[in-house]
Amino acid sequence: MLTFFVIVPVLLAVLFLWMHANNIVKIVAILFQSALFIASLYLVWITRDTDVITIVGSYDDVLGIILRANSLAAVFVLLTTFIFLATSIYSYSYRERKDVRTFWFLMFLLQASFIGLFLSGDLFNIFVLIEVSTLVTVILAMYDRNNRNLFHGKVFLLANLVSVQFYLLGLGYLYRITGALDIERVTYALANMEESNLILPYVLIMASIAFKNTLIPFFSWTPKVRIYPKAPTVVAAVLSGIQAKTSLYLFIRFQEMFAPVSMYDFFLVIGIVTGLFGAVMAISQTNIKMILAYHTISQVGLMTVGFSLASTYAYIGGLYHIVAHAMFKTTLFFCAGILIHSYGTSDVYKIRGVMKRMPLVGLAMVAAILGITGAPLFIGSVSKYFISYDTAPLIMVVTVALSLGTIVSFVKFSTVLFGQCTLTGDIPRAEICKTIPVVIMGGICFIGGILGPQLIYFLLRYDINIQLMSYAQKSLLFAVNAVVGYFIYKYVVSGNQLLSRIGAYNFSFKMICASIGVFLAVMLLLMG
């Protein structure tokens, strides 16, 4: 069963190249994504009680290609299939996408690499799939073929080639000391070794994953290179909604693998700083895609905090926030694409009156904004509730500060909903094929808050409940934060030239490479 999740998208990708009718390609893509989504729901259901393991080829579980689906991997596969299904529907009427066959060939290859990474039980196969997804991402990012896109794509490719070498070196060291590449066997072997033998491979691998996660000091370059303003909207949505989750998945797996030496406190601090810097950079942007891109970094910082706290509730909250982030961030990127196409600009100060002109899109945006800011009854409030549940007062202050930064930037973002548009010319309304996935995902942002504990139990198999009094206190805190955030935007952020200069800051390629070395050196020093 697991083999089909990886092989079938690749076979369909090749088939698309032989099809001549673009409309047939789109229909086949939607039908297949629907079937794959249903299959992934079934996978989530059966992995609630037992792992599903497939050994490809006539080899034993050491030499063969191992695909292993546990409850965590199944949830990531489900997210991937759902986002790609929404993308297929959203992209149906793209008139600017002339070469539909090549586009969907690349998208299906990207999907196969993501699913293969989540299901892979072999460390070297993970390396291969990281490389495949990176290469396909670069091609998709450069799909419009203008000079700026080509430049950013090259920088992204070279930077990732540098970072992944650290993973490969750490992997070689692991194979030398364990004699295995299977994740389960390596985890067992590391648990019975001296900690001094684990430090170097741990630092090498985690430095590479931290780069992929855009943690400090790597936060600045990624939005301008990977999710920059000229990237196709659906590509930006997939990269923010899914690709960012692949790095978080690897972060979870390798922290568990290297449990004897894992630096949870170090990554807790790194997550806090990343979240705060990402929020500040988001506040400083005027391009709606850039606001969303930097908020991906801010939310990754928050999720890293959840995974680094010694708390089951925080861990569950971090996992559920991955689901929440995939929903509301993909919704917002889809909405951004609709607005840019309709208004002919991505400037947040020039787009106005969305609620009046496109009420369904506007309502979906409201639901997604309330979700990402953690408003009561919406999906983000549940995940943030568990991340900050039963934590130290200092961590509580940090989560409040992160929430405040999110609120300020989305007060700025939400100004597009109302007011009178000053742009001249006809502003077309959203097409139905784009509106449908936006409205559905906006609805999930609300349902995920109302039925949060039930969805956590179904997806993650954790039976936990929300304490009504505690939730009410956090809701009151959100209301205070919202009022403070509005006044900060009105009297501090709006028209602030210093913030504009901060928002323009970016890493050069040399600084990117140097920062990887510095990050690795700091980890080595802290581990003695």
Image (spheres, rainbow, N blue to C red):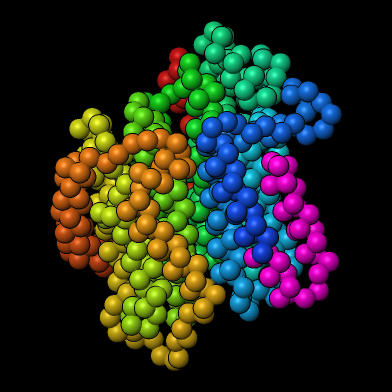
What residue is rendered at 30% in x and 39% in y? 465
Q: Residue at x 60, y 31 (%)?
A: 51
Is residue 142 within the magenta segment? Answer: no
Check the image and report above or below for 163 versus 444. above
30 relative to 310 in the view: left or right: right
Q: Which region of the structure is painted magenta?
A: 1-30
- Most foreground residue, 327 or 149: 327
Residue for point 61% across, 40% down:
118
64, above or below 148, in the image: above
Report the quarter where the C terminus lies: top left
Q: Quadrant of the N terminus?
A: top right
Tell me the residue at 52%/47% (across/down): 244
149 lies above or below 200: below
The percent position of residue 325, horizontal first and vertical second, equals 43, 51
Q: Give x and y (percent) for residue 258.
A: 52, 21
| Residue 319 drawn at (x, y percent) | 43, 40
Residue 328: where, in percent of width, then height? 41, 58
Residue 271 appearing in the image: no
Q: Quadrant of residue 375?
A: bottom left
